[in-house]
Image: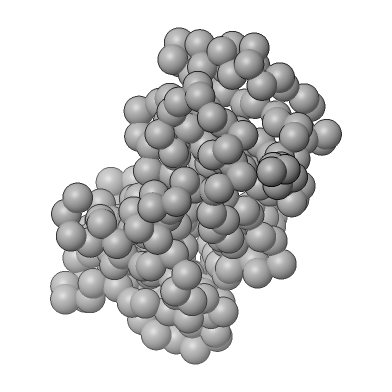
Amino acid sequence: MSRPPQRFKHIALVAGSTPEAREAYERLQGRYGNVEPKDADVIVALGGDGLMLQTLHKFMNSGKPIYGMQRGTVGFLMNDFSIDNLIERLTAAQITIIHPLVMRARDSAGRMHEHRAINEVSLFRQSAQAAHLRILIDGQERLAQLVADGVLLATPAGSTAYNLSVQGAIIPINAPLLALTPISPFRPRRWRGALLPDKAKVTIEVQDGDKRPVAAVADSDEVRSVRSVDVEMDHAVSLNMLFDPGHNLDERILREQFGF
């Protein structure tokens, strides 16, 4: 009986800097080979969630599917590591499609900065004083003033990261939603954030920015002393993540909501 054709013949390996990741890289390269990412059918990332985010950013516009294996500290976005049966695991893997956020930030000098985020866009106070922020959704004012350490907008994939640590809502991966969550809010005291359609455009204006400076961060790309920030999901960019059956991002996010 003939075997079905394999989808993934050419693998590109990328690895973090930890000894565990480098050892895994050498072992997998010796068994399965390693090609340049531009020539690969799939990219295999070895490390933790930080390495996965770096890999997703680096190959954001490549169209290459990315399969992570846990060789780092935090591995929410990773599959379990094994040296064996990699081709079979890749062939059986399920695809989760995610879209990044695009942040357009104007700083105090009037310069515009554009960055993309897979997890979240966050605004933080830069000084000892709380930030004063005005929030508009699709051009309509929804909060005249938020007094807080900051605010963030998270994707479903990022809803279990920093968003969860500041008591934001967990979003199923395929839900067409974004989580807008305050960071240590002072006023209004009872505002705990909002769930927004993933087609919404969020505008955050910094009030009294000279006295109360604010930084904006898209994953790890930071812009200091911003005056206004526009954030929306970039549906034109699709990232294909591969997960082993029964361990996909849907299942992991569901388990998080029950304390696993």
Task: Give the x, y percent position of residue 64.
Answer: 71, 46
Give the quadrant of residue 259. bottom left
79 or 117, nearer to the observer = 79
Residue found at x 37% / y 77%: 195
Answer above or below: position of 190 versus 5. Answer: below
Answer above or below: position of 200 versus 211. Answer: below
Task: Give the x, y percent position of residue 169.
Answer: 29, 67
Q: Is residue 251 visible?
A: yes
Q: How many marks?
A: 0
Task: Give the x, y percent position of residue 225.
Answer: 51, 51
Give the quadrant of residue 114. bottom right
Residue found at x 58% / y 38%: 88
77 or 181, nearer to the observer = 77
Residue found at x 55% / y 85%: 139
* Quarter placement of the N terminus: top right
Residue found at x 44% / y 64%: 173
Q: Residue furthest front?
A: 1
Q: Residue furthest right?
A: 39
52 or 149, nearer to the observer = 52
Color theme of the render: one colour
Task: Give the x, y percent position of residue 218.
Answer: 53, 51
48 or 227, nearer to the observer = 48
Instruction: Classify residue 69 as left or right of residue 169.
Output: right
Q: Is residue 51 visible?
A: no
